[in-house]
Amino acid sequence: MLAFLLENHPLILAECAVAERLRRMPGVELHPTLFNTPLIYGPQAARDAMVAIYREYIETARHAELPLLMTAPTWRLDSTRVSDAGVPETINTDAVGFLSGIRDQLTDDRSNVVVGALIGPKNDCYRPDLAPSADEAMDFHSAQIHELANTPADFLLAQTLPAVGEAIGVARVMAETEKPYLISFCTGTDGHVLDGTPLPDAMARLDDELSRQPAGYFVNCTHPQFLLDAYEAGSLERLVGIQANGSSRDVTALDGAAATEADPVETWAAAMAELHRRHGVSVLGGCCGTTLPHLQALARFPA
C-alpha cells in the first residue's frame, strides 16, 4: 500500500504535530516519558482532544482528495520505558489499534489513509553524541520493531534519528520484517544529519548496507528552507518525505521552548512547495510548531 502511494501519487499529505498541540491545551497532561500515548486509555477529555486532532487531519486530506500518511503514537515506546511507566505491556499494539480505529470510523477508503507505527531514537533526538552504534541500536530497538511489525500497521517509520549509525541498526531490524519501512533523520540548519553526515551520503550509506532497502527517506524537525539552501536539484532522489518544523530557527535552540514558535504559514508553505517542486519530495507534513492551518496550506498545492 505504501509503495503504491509513493509510486502513483505526486503529492501525499502527512500529519502535522499531535503531541505538541496537546501539550499546549489546558487540562491535557502528557506523560513525562511516553508523552501522549497513554491518552489512548484516557482520561476521556484528553483522549477526545487527541481524536479531534487526528480527525482534523483526515478530513483535510479527504476534502482535498489527497492520500494521507498517519502514524500511531508509539515514538520511543521501547520495552524499558513502557515497563518503567507502569502502563499496559500492550500499549504499542493498542496505539496502532487506536489510530486504525479512528481511520476506519472516518473513511471507507483504507488505501488512501494509511496508518504507520513510529520508532524513535534511544536517546535525545538532538544529541547525536548519545546515539548508540548500529549493533547497540539493533539490540535496543528489536523488541519494539518486531512487536509493531506484528500489528495491522501499514508501514513502519523510524523518526527523529540524529545519527547514521543508529539509523543503520534500526533499519537492519526493520528489513528483517515483512513491513515496508521509512527512515527519517533529524537534520540541522546546514541540511546535514545532526551527526554531521550530508543527507545524500546518509541515504546512500543505508541503501548500500541493507539487505532490504527502505521505501524511502524522510527528514523531520527541520525547516524546508535549510534543504533548499544546502542541495541542488537532483541530489535528494531518495528523499520522499518531510515533516517540517513550523519555525526556521535552529531546532536545537527550540528544544524545550515554553511556547510554540512558528514562521508565518504562508512562508512555510512556500518553502515546502519549492522543496516539492525542486526535489520531487512527495510526502509533505508538519512537525513541531505546525497545526491544522499548515496541513490545509499543503492541501491547496496543485498535485
Image (tube, rainbow, N blue to C red):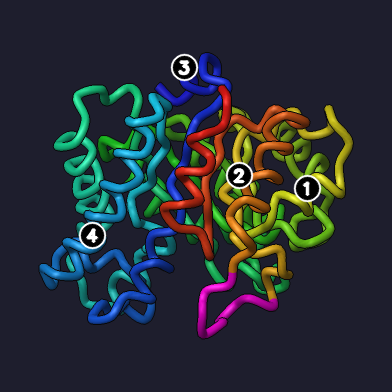
Q: Disc 3 or disc 2, which is closer to the eye? A: 2
Question: For the residue marked with disc 3, what is the amino acid?
Answer: Phe
Q: CA distance from mark 4 to mark 2?
A: 27 Å
> Which element type, helix, strand or loop, lies under badge 2?
strand
Residue 221 falls in which quadrant of the image? bottom right
Secondary structure that dominates the magenta span: loop
Question: Label 2: which residue?
Answer: 242
Question: Label 3: which residue?
Answer: 4
Q: Disc 4 or disc 1, which is closer to the eye? A: 1
Residue at x-position 30% and y-position 55%: 53
Q: CA distance from mark 3 to mark 1?
A: 26 Å
Q: Disc 4 or disc 2, which is closer to the eye? A: 2
- Answer left or right for 147 relative to 298: left
Q: Earlier in the sequence, mark 3 or mark 1?
A: 3
Residue 2: give x, y in percent of width and height.
Answer: 45, 26
Answer whether labels 2 and 1 touch (C-beta < 8 Å).
yes
Q: CA distance from mark 2 to mark 1?
A: 10 Å
> Which element type, helix, strand or loop, lies under badge 3?
helix
Q: Residues within 10 Å of mark 1 (few under 14, many from 20)?
A: many
Question: Label 4: which residue?
Answer: 91
Question: Label 1: which residue?
Answer: 227
